[in-house]
Image: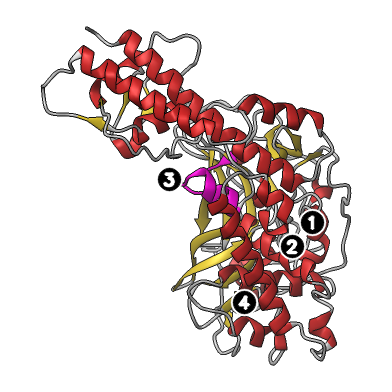
């Protein structure tokens, strides 16, 4: 891996807006250089990874100790020649084209054995080679804090890196937000300001963010799109969110606002787009800077391209000693070339939440819910036994060792059915077959009534999607949301059929 010289060491500030606190981390200062190279073709298959800024082995930039005593090393036998770096789990994966990351910063992103390209669910991160399972987690990406946009979740507002100059009116706008609820508005303001700053990393990285036309967030949806949801509660929530963002823009981007603020979002659509980026790409983490532990909302470049899965193969880890966010493969995880690298955005959330914040839904979300109103109940232990489901309610999983089902019927939707179906359990009391059949029939009838309330069927929704390949992303996401809801209900009906057929009488 190539090495290059870095700037002299400087104290690195982790700052509130008052610029009153400085933390000397022992690493390179926040400095930018002229951009080396940059790929602005967002949808071109790109192999990841770049070199991190490290102290050069040829002596062009030495550590503090080396610079102090390099004149007479023989007089100090305790100071030995630096040893060659040890191999790490990450170094076992080959780095790829570094041009994707060379944007002229002292510390750069490093990634191993992955590539960024278009996938079935949009732009994502994929394995560029097979990865054998290890007993420990393996690093595939390292992103330095200097390239992120972070803002503390609690007062006083603290930013890192400090791109907001003292007295700039953007801080007054951020400071006017509600501390409890407006985290996305604050992050949106910070993102717009970073994109506007000369030579800022995010001015370049913005080319990799989806445009308003490519974004699936319902904040950008029209009234027609919201009606396609066939979910009035979700549509009403999104109208409220849209009005909230619009009112904030009107309050702070009025006609006489200074030009340096007005140019950040001349039109409300620009600000609403920034809010959608903040909501859909934000990572909420607790990070440690020296002795300071801070809960923060973070926009993390490159890591924000990882898509969601309820069975992820990767996770995030904060490496506090050098202020890096690591993306790591789960211990014991086997990865095949071409597999998508995924994380779990939020555990235990229903489809309407994912749709509201991220603009997507899933037909196999194990946490989705159906609200039954009848009195029918089925025997819980018998239902779990039929589908080889093990674990407690919050940890249900399909036990493949107990399953004779070769067609893969059990998925996240069946796990969700086990959680959402009305059940009973009374110690060792066995179920009565006739009562179980009656309960199954009543629950299926209630599911059929739910499906009948929709103006379209799942088959009709699929035909609509197939007939409009060039549809707006928001209307496509809305139709998929209602389709996934119907497929989930149909899956519950099928599971109840299998249950009453296989239950031991």
Q: CA distance from mark 3 to mark 1?
A: 29 Å
For disc 4, the neighbor class at 10 Å (few under 14, some 14 to 19, many from 20) is: many
In depth, the one of 441 and 413 nearer the eye is 441
Is residue 103 visible from the viewing direction of this image?
Answer: no
Instruction: Please give left or right for residue 418 compared with residue 273 in the image.
Output: left
Instruction: Give the residue displayed 28% in from the left and 15% down from the top.
Output: 437
The residue segment tinted magenta is: 342-357
Q: Are marks 1 and 2 in contact (CB under 8 Å)?
A: yes
Within 10 Å of disc 1 (Cα), the crowding (few <14, some 14-19, many 20+) is some
Residue marked by disc 1: 212
Which tag is nearer the camera, tag 4 or tag 2? 2
Q: Which mark is residue 97?
A: none
Residue 86 place in picture, x, y as percent: 58, 44
Q: Residue 56 occupies which quadrant of the picture?
A: bottom right
**Residue on which the image places disc 2:** 273
Q: Which residue is mark 3?
A: 348
Q: Residue at x 65, y 28 (%)?
A: 339
Tags 1 and 4 touching, CB below 8 Å: no
Q: Which numbered disc, 4 or 2, marks the residue that appears first in the sequence?
A: 4
Q: Secondary structure at mark 4?
A: loop
């Amino acid at each position: 891996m190539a090495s290059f010289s870095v700037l002299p060491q400087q104290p690195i500030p982790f700052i509130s807006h008052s610029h009153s606190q400085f933390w000397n981390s022992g690493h390179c200062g926040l400095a930018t250089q002229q951009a080396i190279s940059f790929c602005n073709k967002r949808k071109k298959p790109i192999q990841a990874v770049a070199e991190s800024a490290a102290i050069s082995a040829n002596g062009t930039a030495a550590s503090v100790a080396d610079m102090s005593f390099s004149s007479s090393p023989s007089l100090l036998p305790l100071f030995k020649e630096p040893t060659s770096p040890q191999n790490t789990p990450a170094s076992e994966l080959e780095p790829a084209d570094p041009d994707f990351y060379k944007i002229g910063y002292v510390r750069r992103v490093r990634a191993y054995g992955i590539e960024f390209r278009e996938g079935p669910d949009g732009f994502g991160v994929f394995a560029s080679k097979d990865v054998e399972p290890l007993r420990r987690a393996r690093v595939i990406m390292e992103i330095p804090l200097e390239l992120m946009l972070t803002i503390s979740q609690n007062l006083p507002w603290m930013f890192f890196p400090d791109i907001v100059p003292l007295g700039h009116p953007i801080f007054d706008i951020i400071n006017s937000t509600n501390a409890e609820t407006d985290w996305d508005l604050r992050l949106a303001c910070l993102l717009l300001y970073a994109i506007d700053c000369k030579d800022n990393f995010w001015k370049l990285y913005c080319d990799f963010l989806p445009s308003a036309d490519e974004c699936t967030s319902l904040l950008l949806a029209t009234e027609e799109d919201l009606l396609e949801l066939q979910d009035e509660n979700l549509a009403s929530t999104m109208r409220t969110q849209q009005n909230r963002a619009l009112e904030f823009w009107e309050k702070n981007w009025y006609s006489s606002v200074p030009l340096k603020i007005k140019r950040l979002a001349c039109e409300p659509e620009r600000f609403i787009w920034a809010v959608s980026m903040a909501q859909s790409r934000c990572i909420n983490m607790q990070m440690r800077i020296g002795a300071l532990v801070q809960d923060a909302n973070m926009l993390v470049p490159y890591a924000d391209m990882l898509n969601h899965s309820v069975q992820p193969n990767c996770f995030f880890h904060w490496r506090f000693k050098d202020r890096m966010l690591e993306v790591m493969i789960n211990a014991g995880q086997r990865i095949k070339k071409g597999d998508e690298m995924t994380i779990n955005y939020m555990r235990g959330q229903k489809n309407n939440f994912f749709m509201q914040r991220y603009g997507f839904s899933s037909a196999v979300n194990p946490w989705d819910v159906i609200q039954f109103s009848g009195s029918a109940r089925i025997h819980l232990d018998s239902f779990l036994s039929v589908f080889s489901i093990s674990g407690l309610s919050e940890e249900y999983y399909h036990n493949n060792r107990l399953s004779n089902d070769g067609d893969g019927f059990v998925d996240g939707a069946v796990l969700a059915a086990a959680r959402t179906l009305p059940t009973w359990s009374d110690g060792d009391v066995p179920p009565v077959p006739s009562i179980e059949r009656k309960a199954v029939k009543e629950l299926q009838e209630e599911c059929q009534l739910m499906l009948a309330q929709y103006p379209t069927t799942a088959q009709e929704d699929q035909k609509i999607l197939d007939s409009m390949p060039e549809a707006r992303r928001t209307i496509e996401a809305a139709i998929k949301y209602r389709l996934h809801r119907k497929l989930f209900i149909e899956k519950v009906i099928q599971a109840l059929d299998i249950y009453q057929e296989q239950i031991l009488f």
